[in-house]
Image: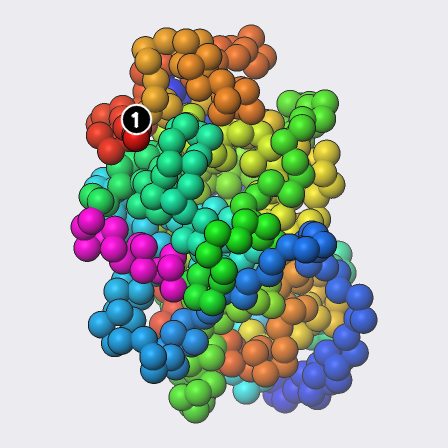
Amino acid sequence: MNGPVRYLSLVGALLVSASALAQGNPEQGKQLVMQGDGSGAPCMACHGQDGGGNNAGGFPRLAGLDENYLAKQMRDYNSGSRTSPIMQPNVDNFSDQQLQDIAAYYAAMPVPATKAPAADDALMAQGEKLALQGDWDNYIPPCSSCHGPDNGGMGDVFPGIAGQHPNYIASQLRAWQAGSRSNDPNNLMVAVAERLTDQQITAVAAWLGAQPASAAKGGK
Amino acid sequence: MNFARVLPFIAVLPLAAAVQAADPVVPVNLPEPKEGQYVHNAPTVDDLMADESIHPELKKVILKGRDMFMNTQQYRGEYVFNDMNCKSCHMGEGRKNWSGPIWPAATTLPDFRGKNGHVNSLEERIAGCFSFSMNGTPPAYGSDDMLAMLAYHQWLAKDAPVYEKNIAGRGFNSLGNKLPELSYEQGEKVYQDNCAICHGADGQGQKKDGQVVFPALWGDNSYNWGAGMTRIFTAASFIKNNMPLGKPGSLSDQEAWNVAYFVNSQERPQDPRYTGDVKETREKFLNFHKHTTYGTEVNGKLLGDHDNTGSKPFLKPDVLRPRTFD
């Protein structure tokens, strides 16, 4: 019976290394969020004082998302694996440590209530089915198979998507289709995104956006 | 004001999205049915709800069986003693070809099975999954829960011919059962590059809020040494046609073989048919274990040489017993 003991110690080692990676300073991050990187808009101008984002503008809610996920997204704007004419100039002067600090600030923020625009019942039913059951005949697994229970996110790889703004979710799925976003590990997201019809994107974004968001609590 | 300045950029995004690549980045690469094979399109829940010929009470029972199949973890500690759901291996609700579709069990059983050397009923086949793959014990034969499972299987087989065995996409064995040369080191590399992101570098999967999201592939919470998936050819074909999730056929055959060998060379709960001696058990069930690493040495360690039954407080469910008609 030495098996379980060995596995536990392995898991313990992983947890330690995962928390060692998350080393942003939220206080420093707060300053940067208000000031910006010197050449563009401060984060809060679009993402809001409460980190809640804005559906009409397509600006995502950042509050409560995983720190390492957020930091990676900003680094990816700088490397070009994720492109945005808005985001790139706003983060290109930040150092990796500053990006981590900003990420730590948003990750620790309480999740503000967001209100998704109304959508008709049939669209919502279709979106719910895609998110929770998928469309296997077109090889589309459900969102929750990676994004976790209630699509609240899994660790620093699969972000919480419940309660995210529909316009943002839809724009990202279309960005994967168009190739302007390619920063998913092992092409796991593009595989699914490129099989979605435009109508399915609208439906799943509408449904996810109307679900309650919760702060990311990692996997394991 | 900054907000207003960036809005025009947003408006441009949908235009860019309209230009879609003709060739997918990740194609769905699944084997074609062989000449003469029967292809069955299993019905969906929408079909069930729309079918007025099915009694509402039966619909309830079918949906109960489906719920057991999709969320088998609700029976953790009762029928299931590891992190598996039925759908963990039988992907796409048990309907998908090349993902171990479950309806053929309803159209081809009762039949003789080499694994236990006698004629098996559908109940007995399902009991096998619970005993080995779920490291547990099945719902009692004839029970309400077992009836629900049977109903789900049989309804998925609707309109499929009974005892037609040349079925396209059945099981997982598209790569055949003849092993190529296998490399543990190469398999480990494939694992860390492609699998670890979900199943963990340590193969223990990931949970959140107590719910299994990515199942453990070895260790106490995974399938036991008697599960069909411990056969390297079964795991290799499953992986080839189903993993990583959403990317069937993306690994080469050799990568699938090597990673199957790597995963199945890790320790896991004891085979319920264990006699108390791993080498004796391997010999006794060699028709099965000739395809596994059980009772063999890998990297200097004799695999399966332990009494660990995982979190299951017993070794063998009582329902696993031979049958004879002599």
Q: Is residue A182 above or below residue B163?
A: below
Say which quadrant the C terminus of chain B sits in: top left
Instruction: Report in which chain the residue with disc 1 lies.
Output: B
**Position of A17 relative to A112 (above/below):** above
**Residue B137 at what x, y percent from top left?**
26, 37
Please identify the dominant SS of the magenta region. helix
Q: Point out residue A191 in the picture as x, y percentages from the top left corner.
A: 66, 61
Q: Amino acid at mark 1?
A: Asp
* Residue sitting at x 72%, y 54%: B35
Residue B45: x and y, percent? 41, 71
Residue at horizontal 38 percent and vertical 44 percent from the top:
B110
Q: Which residues are magenta?
A: B142-155
Instruction: Name the image quarter holding residue B255.
Output: top right
Q: Secondary structure at mark 1?
A: loop
Image coords of residue B103 (percent x, y): 45, 56
Identify the residue under disc 1.
B326
Residue B143 in the magenta stretch? The answer is yes
